[in-house]
Image (cartoon, rainbow, N blue to C red):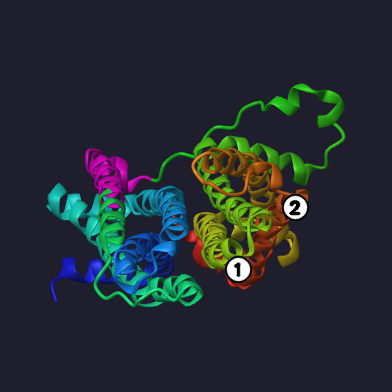
Amino acid sequence: MSAYSKTVFRMFKSNAVRFAVIAVLVMISVSIVSGIGAISPKMRDALAMLPDLGREHDLEYLTFLADNIEVISYIFPVFFIAVAALVAFITITRLVENERAPIGCYKTLGYGGAHIVFKYVFFAAAACVLGCGGGLFLGHFVLSPVLYSSVGDKFRLPAVHGFYLTFGIVAAAVTLFCVLAVTFLVAFRSTKEKPAELLLAKSPKAGGVILIERIPFLWRRLKFKYKSTLRNIFRYKMRFLMTVFSVLGSTALVFAGLALYFSLSVTNPEMLDIMKSISSVLIVFAVVLNALVIYNITNINIDERKREIATLKVLGYRNIEVVGYIFRELFLLTSVGVLLGLPTGYVFMRFMFKFLEFGGIEHVKGFVWIVSGALSLVSLALADLLLFRKIHRVDMNASLKTVE
């Protein structure tokens, strides 16, 4: 194995969690598109057989049902793909930023820009291809049969055979293109810097006066730990925006799935029995997506702040205090994302109900807002529990020896 191949292998090994997160996010998005997108074409092929079976009376209602499922299959998956692409963008951007020194070494050793860019494009492509393959498999062989059976069993639709993968393949191609384009641009930009610049870590961003500091009445009454938290949040604006928008998108999806499910209560029982299967799938996948988004962001933040964590430990902070220092920021950022995600989900569903011929935004009850926000905060709590030991295991000596 060449030295270059070994570095690629080490990158995969050291970033296994990030690789897995990208792959799973892509798999969720593609499986949703593939699974739900296959229902309407399957139904239309089945409906074409009904006249031959002497069941013309079922055509009108089932066509109405197929039209509504088609609307859902067009609009909902777009949101899933957008959130997955955004999280992949954040993950790859942070990965390349953290590998400035290795990139500088490659350039010093004579490696060209193409070799350097390929390493990261290959990483992103492998994760996406694995996710797309898993998503197409899950959508076609699991979601699609389960969802179609909820319609077919109710109305005794004839079985249809074939591969209904058009939606899934398009989603996979779009996701792959978006992630690879972002990876290429981020990696290519880093190759334009001089080796001497890359080998030096970026200088810490200078702090500034934040808005709340201009309100002495409030600022003077805050404890130091809260002042530090607020300054850190506004010091790194890109980190702030990426975190907020990721949580916003996943929270909006949870809200939309719950809103769709509970709006079904105003439709006839037949519609309720059929559509609740689709909306249940959307809710489950939206919650999983939400949890992965928050876990990924939390994990990245801990990886990037090991030196800071080690410094706090050296200064005598206990583990619980260090955890509070790190997770306090994430709680505030997640809360902002939730507060913005709920109205975004409301606007999204208001738009969607204009195209659906059942339900309405007026039927969305108040507890949908509460449950949607609570699920995001529960996801944060689970991420905190899963990553508590990671903070506890931070090696003070090794972390403080890193160049900064």
Residue name at image x 25 percent, y 38 percent: 193
Residue 114 vertical position relative to residue 230 in the rendered view, above or below: below
Up the image or down, 244 lies above or below 23; here it is above
Residue type, mark 2 in image = Ile
User: Residue at left 33%, top 73%?
Assistant: 53
Q: 354 or 233: nearer the eye? A: 354
With 313 as the anchor, is 308 left or right in this view?
A: left
* 229 left or right of 133 in image: right
Q: Give left or right: position of 288 versus 336.
A: left
Which portion, as a residue range, is magenta? 178-200
Q: Position of residue 329 (x, y in %)?
A: 66, 48
Say whether disc 1 or disc 2 marks the residue closer to the N-terminus. 2
Please name the residue that numbered disc 2 is placed on.
370
Is residue 16 placed above or below 217 in the rendered structure? Answer: below
Report crowding for label 2: few under 14, some 14 to 19, many 20 or more residues within 10 A (C-alpha).
few
Q: Which SS class for mark 1?
A: helix
Q: Position of residue 25 (x, y in %)?
A: 43, 62
User: Extreme front residue here?
Assistant: 54
Circle number at residue 282: none
Determine crowd level at label 1: few under 14, some 14-19, many 20+ residues with C-alpha closer than 10 A.
some
- Work out which residue is located at the far top of the displayed protein and give it: 214
Q: Between residues 129 and 28, which one lies in front from this camera angle?
A: 28
Residue at numbered disc 1: 387
